[in-house]
Image: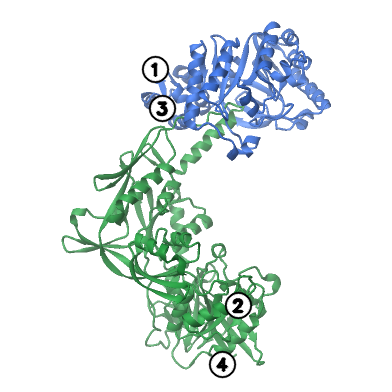
Chain colours: A blue, B green
């Protein structure tokens, strides 16, 4: 195979299958018929093989990738032309991978090259997990982690959710202690957002969430605890031990290129953004991607870079766009810095945690000063 | 073809709101075959969407019907519909002046209400023959016996022959037609006199220019004549005359004394053919106009601003278009530090204001910000001069004010007797002066108060309705100006005066109002990146304060895999939301906050 002139990008593969739908989730997923799964994997594998890219990061997400079983995941990974020094992540559901009555063989993944697992913990408090529609309990999560580490995959990320119904600083503390003592190298801590079209979205008035002030306090408490355990708060919602940042996700935030395969998967390559429609049959029968316009512009860059604690490096910006950031822009940064929402140095502007919390307001204001 | 004037009947229908005026009008059209049943949409005469929704007739309308009566003769019935709200009392009086009789509808479940009486008295003032009709007999709670007696007792009208009908089902509606023919006199008409025709409505049509609706009192007018409007002296060549028919106008070779019809003459704006003016012919002019014309003056003023400054010209055009059809709407450009460029607009009353605002938003697709409505105050200055103020921005330095005067109204409230206490409380709160109270029947009262106009224009009617569970009705007219202790309240956000929120108020109410405004603003201004102090001041003195706490968090959505576009759209949506806000330095105020202050009520 001719590989010498292949471009290296990230690969995202969407597995749109779930045993049941979580009430907060608005990703594209459903409970499939067995033959649909086989036809889909067939198509994905051939699309990966046919793609003209080499991949240094692979992220198999969903939906529930673990739903399709170890062998099929391994097949997908094996279809890709993987660059050296790679990061290959698979999202796993503890009810598949930590089930006491059924073995899940992480070594199959390990042999295929998978070296990172992302596990949906959400909360270590079982009553909170139940409210979120998660079937497995804390014990399944522990068991899944053990199995993964035992098979040699110890780069593990846990998803944690903030601002869930009934959550308090005390109950959050329980979840944080679990994360810290679990040996996980990476924590994604998202604030629950109620999306239209989800079960929560349809029952908005019945769901009592912590208010904005309480949620802000939960966020700061999580950050505080994780930082004192050695995690760096490297992105609005992401924490990592040194060297364990998600390289795949960093591609999104650093405006780097990635290919997304599967229905509802998004791509950014060659300055264009495009995606596949939320329709698995269309995907399997070969419908092409939908153009989503130009990407990688200045405004987008600012929006993404400010999600990262590294922020905007002025020199990098001028290299990329062939022009300096304006004095007005930097003055506005200074304005935010003076109120403690950001940090402005001679070469860079980044948001503080207080700034992260209202980053939508700050970013949508700042881009008007470009 | 000459019309036998003995077989013309000119009449209107008067009623309290919701007593079934438009429904009866529709039924009359149907029974005289003026419209085929299949063309009937409910309430044909109310042709504005707004009128249908609010159930209020805003403009007068007229239609000519042919009716073959039981005596075997064919009659020409001219039905002139009247506006149904106190804001339009003058228009009502001109419509009545065009008639010889009035059908008075009274709801068989509700009986005599404020506008039943007000309109009946107006009709009696114009010497109209009144034909009472008891409507809604199909409703289970209908009590036509009691209501007939009430009409006899309260108004003194003989109801022994009153038709008892259901306009909704059509039951007994023919009886109304027979009574119109039988009781309402034919017009006294002399074609040989110089022409005098009363304008009771005018409507702008983009093809024909203004269509002038007239009742010819004396003489005649025909196409080719030079018509003269006696109040303005303006002259136009008559293009067309005719009858208004339900489906389309019917051109006639002339209009003669006693007839009701339309004239077109390429007139550009309704301001040139104002309601109440007299049309005569230049060839043989009448020496005196018909009595009763007056130019209506706006009573309530507010600033109207485009939410997006770029819409200023569109707003001007929309107002100009509305004014083509509404001579009582006035506007002139004004600027506000807070709101930019806009217009100071004058209205007959608060309903008129709301209607115009809604039409601007709906028909012209404009997003508007309106300021607190104001009445016209007279301010006597220390140098002996008097100024009139309809905009708080122009309120003079208190040091230069010798005294202030504000407009008062004569107000009647009709209500079941059990609510007398709560109504009197409300009127006292609104600085009302009690005049007297009459028991119309043992359980219904007419409470007469003198109320300051500025206490009614905000929300008086809403409060009255909620306190009386909708049973009380209300009618008022402007009486005079009286000395008053007034102050101007300023609202400061983050230390900056927001001129659009300033208003003039009686000093006794300043403190409690200030507190309510501060609370309302606090509830309606979303938390922002910085704490926002809200202060209410009289001159330099702060009399109320609140604080909007700083926002701690906005929506922290994740990046949805690589779906960057979604995140971008979310931010754009946030920006879109901000566009709808007014910016005052670093403070963003949503339009709802302005509305909330405007609608400030007692419980607020």
Asked if badge 2 and badge 1 are on a common chain, one would say no
Q: How crowded is mark 3: few (under 14 residues within 10 Å), some or many (20 or more)?
A: some
Residue matched to label 1: A345
| Whether marks 4 and 3 lie on the same chain | no
Residue, disc 3: A329
Q: Distance between the residues labelled 2 and 1?
A: 79 Å
Indicate which label's residue lies in the foreground, 2 or 4: 4
2 or 4: tag closer to the N-terminus: 4
Q: Label 2: few (<14), some or many (≥20) within 10 Å? A: some
Residue named by callout 4 = B6
Letter of the chain that mark 2 sits on in the rendering: B
The chain under label 3 reads A
Front position among marks 1 and 3: 1
Mark 4 neighbour density, 10 Å: few (under 14) some (14–19) many (20 or more): some
The residue that disc 2 covers is B245
As drawn, the residue found furthest toward the left would be B383
């Amino acid at each position: 195979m001719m590989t010498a002139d292949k471009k290296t990008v990230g690969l995202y593969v969407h597995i749109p299958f779930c045993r049941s739908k979580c009430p907060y989730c608005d990703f594209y997923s459903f409970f499939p018929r067995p033959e649909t799964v086989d036809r889909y994997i067939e198509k994905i594998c051939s699309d990966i093989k046919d793609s003209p890219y080499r991949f240094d990061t692979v992220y198999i997400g969903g939906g529930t990738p673990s739903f399709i079983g170890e062998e099929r995941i391994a097949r997908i990974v094996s279809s890709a032309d993987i660059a050296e020094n790679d990061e290959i992540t698979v999202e796993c559901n503890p009810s598949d991978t930590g089930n006491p009555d059924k073995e899940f063989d992480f070594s199959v993944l390990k042999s295929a090259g998978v070296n990172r697992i992302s596990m949906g913990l959400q909360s270590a408090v079982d009553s909170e997990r139940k409210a979120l529609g998660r079937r497995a309990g804390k014990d399944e999560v522990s068991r899944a982690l053990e199995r993964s580490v035992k098979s040699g995959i110890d780069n593990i990320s846990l998803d944690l959710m903030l601002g869930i119904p009934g959550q308090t600083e005390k109950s959050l503390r329980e979840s944080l202690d679990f994360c810290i003592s679990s040996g996980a190298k990476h924590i994604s801590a998202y604030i629950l957002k109620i999306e239209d079209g989800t079960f929560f979205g349809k029952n908005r008035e019945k769901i009592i969430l912590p208010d904005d002030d309480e949620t802000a306090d939960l966020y700061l408490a999580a950050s505080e605890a994780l930082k004192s355990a050695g995690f760096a708060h490297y992105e609005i919602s992401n924490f990592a031990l040194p060297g364990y940042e998600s390289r795949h996700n960093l591609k999104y935030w650093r405006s780097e290129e990635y290919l997304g395969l599967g229905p509802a998967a998004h791509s950014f390559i060659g300055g264009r953004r495009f995606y596949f429609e939320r329709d698995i049959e269309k995907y399997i029968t070969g419908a092409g991607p939908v153009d989503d316009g130009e990407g990688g512009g200045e405004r987008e860059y600012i929006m993404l870079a400010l999600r990262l604690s590294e922020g905007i490096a002025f020199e990098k910006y001028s290299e990329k766009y062939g022009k300096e950031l304006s004095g007005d822009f930097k003055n506005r940064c200074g304005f935010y810095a003076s109120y403690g929402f950001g940090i402005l140095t001679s070469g860079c502007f980044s948001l503080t945690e207080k700034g992260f919390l209202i980053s939508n307001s700050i970013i949508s204001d700042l881009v008007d000063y470009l | 073809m000459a019309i036998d004037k003995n077989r013309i009947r000119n009449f209107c229908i008067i009623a309290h709101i919701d007593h079934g005026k438009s429904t009866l009008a529709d039924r009359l059209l149907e029974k005289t075959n003026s419209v085929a049943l299949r063309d009937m949409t409910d309430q044909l005469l109310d042709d504005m969407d707004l009128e249908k929704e609010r159930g209020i007739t805003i403009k007068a309308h007229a239609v000519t019907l042919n009716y073959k009566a039981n005596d075997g003769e064919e009659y020409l019935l001219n039905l002139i519909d009247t506006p149904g709200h106190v804001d339009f009392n003058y228009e009502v009086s001109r419509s009545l002046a065009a008639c010889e009789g009035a059908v008075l509808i009274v709801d068989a479940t509700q009986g005599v209400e404020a506008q039943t009486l007000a309109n009946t008295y107006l009709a009696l003032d114009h010497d109209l023959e009144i034909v009472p009709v008891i409507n809604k007999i199909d409703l289970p709670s209908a009590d036509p016996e009691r209501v007939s007696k009430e009409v006899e007792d309260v108004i003194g009208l003989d109801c022994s022959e009153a038709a008892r009908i259901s306009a909704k089902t059509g039951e007994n509606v023919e009886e109304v037609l027979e009574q119109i023919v039988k009781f309402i006199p034919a017009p006294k008409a002399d074609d040989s006199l110089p022409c005098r025709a009363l304008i009771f409505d005018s409507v702008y049509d983009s093809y024909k220019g203004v269509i002038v609706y007239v009742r010819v009192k004396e003489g005649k007018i025909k196409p080719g004549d030079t018509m003269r409007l006696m109040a303005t002296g303006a002259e136009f060549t008559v293009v067309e005359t005719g009858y208004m028919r339900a489906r389309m106008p019917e051109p006639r070779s002339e209009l003669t004394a006693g007839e009701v019809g339309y004239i077109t003459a390429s007139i550009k704006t309704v301001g040139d053919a104002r309601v109440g003016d007299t049309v005569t012919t230049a060839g043989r002019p009448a020496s005196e106009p018909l009595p009763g014309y007056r130019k209506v003056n706006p009573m309530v003023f507010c600033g109207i601003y485009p939410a997006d400054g770029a819409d200023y010209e569109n707003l001007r055009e929309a107002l100009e278009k509305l004014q083509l059809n509404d001579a009582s709407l006035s506007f002139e450009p004004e600027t506000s530090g807070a709101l930019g460029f806009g217009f100071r607009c004058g209205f007959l009353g608060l309903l008129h204001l709301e209607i115009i605002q809604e039409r601007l938003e709906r028909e012209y697709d404009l997003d508007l910000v309106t300021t607190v409505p104001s009445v016209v105050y007279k301010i006597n200055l220390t140098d002996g001069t008097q100024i009139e103020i309809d905009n708080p921005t122009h309120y003079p330095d208190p040091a230069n004010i010798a005294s202030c005067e504000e407009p008062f109204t004569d107000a009647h409230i009709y209500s079941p007797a059990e609510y007398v206490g709560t109504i009197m409380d409300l009127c006292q709160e609104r600085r009302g002066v009690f005049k007297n109270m009459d028991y119309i029947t043992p359980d219904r009262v007419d409470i007469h108060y003198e109320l300051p106009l500025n206490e009614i224009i905000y929300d008086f009617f809403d409060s009255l309705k909620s306190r009386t569970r909708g049973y009380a009705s209300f009618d008022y007219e402007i009486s005079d100006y009286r000395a008053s202790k007034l102050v101007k309240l300023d609202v400061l956000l983050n230390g900056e005066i927001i001129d659009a929120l300033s208003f003039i108020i009686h000093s006794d109410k300043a403190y409690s109002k200030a507190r309510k405004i501060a609370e309302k603003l606090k509830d309606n201004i979303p938390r922002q990146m910085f704490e926002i102090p809200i202060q209410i001041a009289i001159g330099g003195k702060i009399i109320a304060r609140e604080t909007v706490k700083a926002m701690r968090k906005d929506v922290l959505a994740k990046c949805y895999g690589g779906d960057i576009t979604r995140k971008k759209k979310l931010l754009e949506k946030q920006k879109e939301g901000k566009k709808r806000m007014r910016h005052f330095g670093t403070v963003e105020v949503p339009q709802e906050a302005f509305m909330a202050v405007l609608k400030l009520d007692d419980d607020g």
